[in-house]
Amino acid sequence: MKFGTFDDTRKEYVINTPKTPYPWINYLGNEQFFGLISNTAGGYTFYRDARMRRLTRYRYNNIPLDTGGRYYYLYDGGDFWTPGWMPVKRDLDFYECRHGLGYTSITGERNGISVNQLAFVPMGHNAEVHRLVVKNTGDVKKTVKLFSFAEFCLWNANDDMTNFQRNLSTGEVEVKDSVIYHKTEYRERRNHYAFYSVNKEIAGFDTDRESFVGMYNGLDAPQAVAAGEATNSVASGWSPIGSHALDITLEPGEAQSFIFVLGYIENPEDEKWEALNVINKKPAQAVIDQFATDAQVDAALEVLAAHWDNLLSKYQIKSGDDKLNRMVNIWNPYQCMVTFNMSRSASYFESGIGRGMGFRDSNQDLLGFVHQIPERARERILDIAATQFPDGSAYHQYQPLTKKGNNEVGSGFNDDPLWLISGTAAYIKETGDYSILDEQVPFDSNPDHTATLFEHLKLSFEHVTNNLGPHGLPLIGRADWNDCLNLNCFSTEPGESFQTTENIAGGVAESVFIAGLFVFVGPDYAEICRMRGLDDVAADAVAKIENMSAITLSHGFDGDWFLRAYDHYGDKIGSKENEEGQIFIEPQGMCVMAGIGVENGEAARALTSVQERLDTDYGIVLQQPPYSKYYLNLGEISTYPPGYKENAGIFCHNNPWIMIAETVLGHGDRAFEIYKKIAPAYLEDISEVHRMEPYVYSQMIAGKDAVRHGEAKNSWLTGTAAWNYVAITQSILGIQADFAGLKVDPCIPAEWDGFEITRVFRGDTYVISIQNPNHVSKGVASLTLDGAAVEGNIIAPVGDGSVHQVVVTLG
């Protein structure tokens, strides 16, 4: 069942009912200021950090679920409603939501009045613009009232929800003309305030939540809206809001626009005030003046569209499959950029309070967006590396506002350092910029203790070889990629963190996954060493990689698949010897991606085992059989009910590892079969089962042991986005950035005739025609560049900034 449709020409998803199976959201903002907005106008806004600089309040796990947002109420002679249906939930004569790239347009119509709410964050501004167009679609004159509503958060979202004895006495606002200023705590240590403006004269306002909503009302029936009159309340303590009231008279067919700006301002310490307790409003007014007219808003929208057109132009496909085209050309790279901006911090499943930017997460996200905006990738790599410690370990997370590590989570996730090598190598392959390796980067964000980025990579590599267990496999630490496999926790205390508690000292539990990751990323490290003339260091690295590969086959293979780990007692995990959890997806994907067991057939046996034991109609589950009880020696993984999350759920993040692994063995049909099972555009017709947005990936789909097999959760902010983009664009379609140039190595379904890729690489544009006359899955028979034959399958950078024609024949 569908709840909307793709509009590929406009790069939009069009939702035609507000009653989607779950709130279907979009992200606004590309630089420092961001917003989340649902198809019913729910969500919130923040500057840089969803915890420390949140402008508007949002209550998670609410009833109804998606309550709170930037709402606009239309009052029409006693009848009142909202164009996004929520929160009033009056029946609408027409409803439509269009989620586009960095903007959302919601239209509602009732009783001869149409209201369109267009929301976006303009490039270069720390503000969210909402343009409301109110139109009389009837044949009689209409006099109506429009009420805006935004509930201000008291900046620190965690403190805002917990410290009521203080916060219910601190709220402060100012109102001048048609602008409401939120200035809680500005008189003391803060140099920032928020403002909420409209470009028309107002008939009234409210800034006190209780006065606007009523003590015993909800947002579905605010008493000021129900009465059709603002109260002109001024918040003093209690909960500050922003609400404008506007009188509107419309002739039949007439439309009027109203431009609201919700923004963030920082003032220098010596420019905070105009007068005693009167904030300096000049910077806010300067922003407001730039969006005073429809022409200014239209111009800003054009800049935003051009920004996305430029980003998406870096990789485009023309094929006979519309679903493949829209995923590769529009929605997957769009999601990759959102995950780059947000990491895992702020979604409808992540509150933005408990997590910052992930060390592992952000490095993986780089893989999906580095070709779009490499200069920001460079900055992100240096930020990530600065949270590393001198022994090569790293903070697991850091806050985007301070760029310092999160002490609450700490370090000890032993796969983290290797991902820095992976992210840096991806950047160098894309750009050819080796100078990044010479950048001085702090340890633990301490500017007095620095080393080159290359030294950080060396420490990352050596962190594995310096932390080996009894079998010579890497120690797992607190966890590896699977944060819920906690082999040193042994927790019996409710509420203890599985990730940060270590009740029995580590030093035995080993990870086969980290071994596979080491062999997978190690060759990139060795090549970087060679490029720096460090042949001895490179040779030593290769020897250690080869040794790890051999150890993995000797101690990490269980006969038909790779083991997952050894626990604290030295017992196998992910083995036929286990009663439950006999086979895991992660090591099968990573070890085969690394080439371990390819030559002797063990890689092929592992992937066959995945297909036979882990595959389902909705994707590949994480492990089988599921855990039916809590295992003290395994930790959080065994706390989930069977079929959910890490306990045999379809963890979409690692499905593409199997896709890529299948391409290593030349299995193009199987790789694309797996791709289609979790790619959202292919799931649109079963949205009532899948429930999440049909335009972006989810982290998890309920597995075959779950009550609701096929139901997704945790959409948007997931490494699934980057890894699926890598799998389809680099491994299946086969256009890969490499140190020496652009590598062409497709692995596709044999029935395909071919396709065309336009790829921008190091300033040149390559139009690559892949032709498959012999209907094979893999193998480049010939390659020409501008008509001249090229030996092998790597296109060396031309470097003239021009368009070049590439013809590739498979065979």
Image: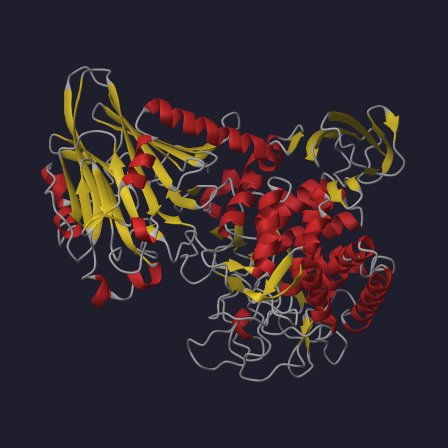
Question: Looking at the image, which residue is at 55% across and 57% down?
Answer: 703
Res 617 seen here? no
Q: Is residue 378 above or below residue 85?
A: below
Measured as percent of width and height from the top left, residue 664 is found at 78, 50
Depth order, front residue of 41/168:
168
Measured as percent of width and height from the top left, residue 388 is found at 60, 66
Quadrant into which the C terminus falls: top right
Question: Looking at the image, which residue is at 26% across and 45% down?
Answer: 280
- Position of 422 with respect to 626 (left or right) is right
Instruction: Please state the total of marks drawn on the protein image.
Output: 0
Measured as percent of width and height from the top left, residue 239 is found at 20, 55
Residue 385 sits in quarter: bottom right
Residue 216 sits in quarter: bottom left
- Position of 709 with respect to 765 (left or right) is left
Res 686 seen here? yes
Q: Is residue 251 above or below residue 680?
A: above
- The residue at the far front in this view is 270
Q: What's the coloring here?
A: secondary structure
Question: Looking at the image, which residue is at 60% across and 58% down?
Answer: 621
- Position of 266 with respect to 2 (left or right) is left
Depth order, front residue of 91/143:
143
Q: Is residue 295 above or below residue 630?
A: above
- Position of 780 with respect to 438 (left or right) is right
Residue 752 sits in quarter: top right
Depth order, front residue of 28/294:
294
Measured as percent of width and height from the top left, residue 15 is found at 41, 34
